[in-house]
Amino acid sequence: MRKVEATELRKLTAREWQYFKRGYDVGQFFARQDANEAAGRRREDRLLRVREVMKLTGLGRTTIWQLERDGQFPRRVKLSGARGRAVGYRASEVARWIAQRIAARAS
């Protein structure tokens, strides 16, 4: 295999780096899920905050809420009482939603 010189590498733009990082983060998330399942560990379903869901899906806050309202995205879970505003999403449901989107695109 030929060694790649540093001068041959193209620098990524800020947007390209964001896309690369987002893809890497999603891959790491699924790798952790797969490792836990392979090891036979039943892990408590983690709650993801909105920012984490935005990072994993690449969608904006408003789009996530519109999809949720239309029944096309997992429902949020209230983290505090009736007056609180903090919400989270079950990691397994978000991962399943992403997998369904990928499967739909492949077919």
Image (cartoon, grey):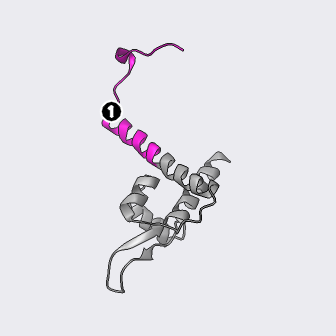
Q: Residue at x 36, y 60 (%)?
A: 51
Q: Residue 16 falls in which quadrant of the image?
A: top left
Depth check: 81 or 18 in front? Answer: 81
Residue tagged 1: 13
User: Which x, y percent locates residue 99?
Assistant: 59, 54
Q: Residue at x 54, y 49 (%)?
A: 31
Q: Residue at x 46, y 44 (%)?
A: 23
Residue that extends furthest to the bottom in the rendered view of this protein: 82
Q: Residue 66 falls in which quadrant of the image?
A: bottom left
Depth check: 74 or 42 in front? Answer: 42
* Relative side of 97 to 55, left or right: right
Residue 14 lies within the magenta run = yes
User: Which x, y percent locates residue 36?
Assistant: 57, 57
Magenta: main secondary structure equals: helix
User: Which x, y percent locates residue 97?
Assistant: 56, 60
**Residue 21 sits above or below residue 35 on the image:** above
Give the magenta part as a residue range.
1-25
Residue that extends furthest to the right in the rendered view of this protein: 107
Helix, strand, or loop for circle 1? loop
Amino acid type at image mark 1: Thr
Residue 21 lies within the magenta run = yes
Q: Quadrant of the N terminus?
A: top right
**Residue 73 sits above or below residue 85 on the image:** above
- Is the residue marked by circle 1 packed among few (<14), some (14-19), or many (20+) residues within 10 Å? few
Q: Residue at x 59, y 53 (%)?
A: 34
User: Which x, y percent locates residue 86?
Assistant: 34, 74
